[in-house]
Image (cartoon, rainbow, N blue to C red):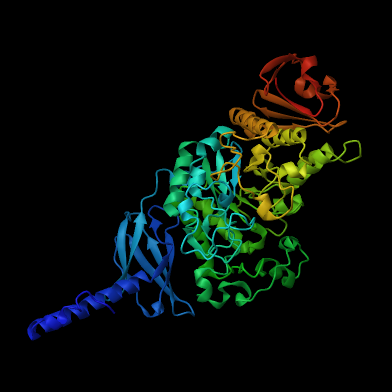
């Protein structure tokens, strides 16, 4: 080992030589201790005082670390338990953090001069009572790699296996956190009050890692997006604009290049002991009272693909790891919500424990689980407050409303002349709300990052697009829109995910179109952008659209009518899909209209009498305030 003291030794006198040799030995011992300490990984990397759960379990990783005997001395912090796995390179330390403990740094001594410095931070004011996203919000879903390249210097990070390839629809295109931060004003002006970014954590995979769902480090932002501090600053900057940040959580799997995959702490850390066995995708086994144990296990323990090893949270150390990782990011990045990927694929007993731990720590928080099925019975099983036949108790406040999404697309595309078609699909989907403990907390959307673009699904018909946008913004639930919906982005060439998640126009130097400035947009694209801006800002200003009671009428002859009511405020939404104008019969809506003779047309800001108000033009809508 090189030492700066070595080269001049030969010039010294014998007495001095002994001193230099001693210095050499001491310096190299110090160097080796420092090197050893630097090679030790501790997760979570820090924690906070004043948490409701006073227990903290550290995972310590290092060469033969299990042979060490850790000790610590810090007021209010005690080491309660030391656990060793079957792998000598891991230690698990259970700490107890007293209410009286103060923020600061302390050392966890391993032996002699080898120690780990650990930080306890002070929480931001009101952290435990933070308000998560809710029905007053509108969410903007972003695939960061495809939104905007704010910092070209990080595109080809030296650490990355996969290099940038803008020409490949499945490659890395260079979008990053700075690209989002640079355009927060644009997002705010559109009327959005929350951002959901697909995962930003490190995905150091060989290929197709831009989406973020093959995580290789659960505590590190991917350098091609920025770093941890860059993300935290984005969250803070967004908060100043009234925008909450939603974190995309992956509990089910990691990437095959995750750092622990070459040296697992336990054989059962990964399902089927690290052997690839594909999931059956039979999500019904979670609720099926007749399901076999074989099928039930295959659903949740099976892998998605060989490059995404399936995590086994039945291992209690991994369960603690995932719970603490979620809480760490909420606290560190000052988050306003979570979206949980592939929720039914996670062991359901763990998901109950995980959701309870998060909601206990943050009782006003919110998180939405992805359950991609068209069966509302299956979806409702996961929502908090549901009384399930098997007595399963979930603590998940919100779920994604995929049945309503499907019904919306069908309603817009189908002919209402046929029995049970068209608007009837939408009406029937909402009529199923009786199965949900709280349908007003469902997240609704015209499309998302895993499906064809909304404008593509409705055959690029701007009139139908407007009807769909109005419905999503004014019906019950928490609306979410995929980036680019506002400028009619499509995937007309293929159903490939890489094309669905296309680059946002204006996010890269040299783009012919720039949706941020309006440059180069077609007449229809510009019209759509203004339209979404108008409807979302109306929604932001009208509490009845956020939390008002929904009353719907059975669709009739291509017209769908529903009301949102909040205390004395009453709004009537009329959606006409016909090729011809329609005059509604006021008698049918008398229970809601009563003796009202004048209405305000909210979208156009005009006053109408009863006859004018109930006349609706072809392929059009009306939003009326009584």
Residue 245 as seen in the image, left or right of residue 546: left
Residue at 64 percent of width and 26 percent of height: 567
State the quadrant of the N terminus.
bottom left
Q: Residue 93 location, x and y as percent? A: 41, 69
Residue at 49 percent of width and 46 percent of height: 150
Work out whether 338 lies above or below 13.
Answer: above
Considering depth in this image, is 466 or 551 the residue closer to the camera?
466
Residue at 68 percent of width and 58 percent of height: 391
Q: Could one spot residue 63 in this view of the protein?
A: yes
Work out whether 475 lies above or below 406.
Answer: above
Q: Residue 191 location, x and y as percent? A: 58, 33
Residue 599 as seen in the image, left or right of residue 339: right
Residue 249 as seen in the image, left or right of residue 535: left
Q: Could one spot residue 382 in this view of the protein?
A: no
Total label count? 0
Q: Residue 107 location, x and y as percent? A: 30, 66
Q: Residue 58 location, x and y as percent? A: 42, 66
Residue 624 as seen in the image, left or right of residue 67: right
Considering depth in this image, is 163 or 46 the residue closer to the camera?
163
Residue at 84 percent of width and 33 percent of height: 555
Q: Quadrant of residue 6?
A: bottom left
Considering depth in this image, is 379 or 458 the residue closer to the camera?
458
Residue at the far bottom: name it: 14
State the quadrant of the C terminus.
top right
């Amino acid at each position: 080992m090189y030492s700066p003291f070595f080269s001049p030794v030969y010039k010294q006198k014998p007495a001095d030589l002994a001193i230099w040799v001693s210095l050499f030995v001491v310096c190299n011992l110090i160097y080796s201790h420092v090197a050893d300490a630097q090679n030790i990984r501790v997760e979570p990397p820090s924690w906070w005082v004043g948490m409701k759960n006073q227990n903290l379990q550290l995972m310590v990783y290092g060469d033969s670390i299990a042979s060490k005997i850790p000790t610590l001395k810090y007021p209010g912090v005690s080491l309660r338990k030391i656990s060793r796995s079957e792998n000598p390179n891991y230690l698990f330390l259970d700490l107890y953090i007293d209410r009286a403990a103060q923020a600061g740094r302390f050392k966890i001594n391993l032996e002699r001069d080898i120690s780990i410095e650990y930080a306890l931070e002070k929480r931001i004011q009101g952290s435990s009572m933070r308000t998560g996203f809710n029905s007053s919000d509108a969410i903007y879903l972003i695939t960061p790699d495809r939104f905007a390249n704010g910092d070209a210097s990080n595109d080809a990070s030296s650490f990355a296996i996969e290099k940038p390839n803008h020409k490949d629809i499945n490659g890395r295109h260079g979008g990053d956190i700075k690209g989002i931060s640079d355009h927060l004003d644009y997002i705010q002006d559109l009327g959005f009050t929350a951002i959901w970014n697909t995962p930003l954590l490190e995905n150091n995979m060989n290929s197709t890692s831009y989406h973020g769902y093959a995580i290789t480090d659960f505590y590190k932002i991917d350098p091609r997006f920025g770093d941890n501090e860059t993300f935290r600053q984005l969250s803070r900057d967004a908060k100043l604009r009234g925008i909450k940040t939603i974190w995309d959580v992956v509990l089910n799997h990691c990437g095959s290049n995750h750092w622990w995959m070459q040296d697992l702490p336990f054989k059962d850390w990964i399902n089927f002991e690290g052997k690839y066995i594909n999931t059956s995708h039979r999500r019904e086994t979670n609720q099926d009272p007749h399901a076999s144990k074989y099928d039930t296990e295959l659903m949740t323990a099976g892998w998605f693909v060989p490059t995404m090893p399936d995590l086994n949270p039945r291992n209690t150390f991994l369960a603690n790891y995932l719970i603490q990782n979620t809480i760490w990011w909420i606290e560190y990045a000052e988050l306003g919500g979570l979206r949980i990927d592939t929720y039914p694929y996670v062991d359901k007993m763990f998901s109950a424990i995980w959701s309870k731990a998060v909601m206990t720590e943050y009782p006003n928080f919110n998180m939405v689980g992805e359950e991609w099925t068209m069966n509302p019975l299956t979806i409702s099983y996961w929502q908090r407050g549901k009384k399930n036949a098997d007595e399963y108790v979930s603590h998940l406040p919100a779920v994604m409303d995929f049945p309503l999404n499907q019904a919306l697309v069908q309603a817009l595309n189908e002919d209402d002349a046929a029995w049970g078609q068209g608007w009837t699909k939408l009406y029937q989907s909402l009529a199923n709300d009786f199965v949900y403990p709280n349908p007003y907390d469902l997240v609704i959307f015209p499309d998302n990052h895993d499906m064809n673009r909304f404008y593509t699904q409705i055959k690029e018909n701007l009139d139908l697009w407007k009807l769909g946008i109005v419905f999503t913004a004014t019906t019950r639930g928490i609306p979410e829109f995929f980036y680019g919906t506002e400028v009619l982005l499509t995937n007309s060439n293929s159903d490939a995910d890489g094309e669905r998640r296309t680059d946002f126009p204006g996010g890269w130097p040299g783009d012919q179109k720039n949706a941020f400035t309006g440059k180069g947009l077609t007449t229809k694209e510009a019209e759509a952008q203004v339209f979404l801006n108008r409807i979302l800002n109306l929604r932001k200003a009208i509490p009845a659209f956020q939390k008002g009671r929904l009353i719907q009428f059975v669709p009739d002859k291509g017209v769908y009518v529903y009301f949102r009511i909040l205390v004395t405020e009453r709004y009537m939404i009329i959606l006409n899909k016909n090729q011809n104008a329609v005059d509604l019969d006021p008698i049918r809506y008398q229970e809601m209209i009563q003796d009202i003779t004048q209405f305000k047309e909210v979208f156009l800001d005009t006053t109408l009498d009863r006859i004018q108000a109930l006349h609706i033009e072809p392929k059009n809508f009306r939003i009326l305030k009584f």
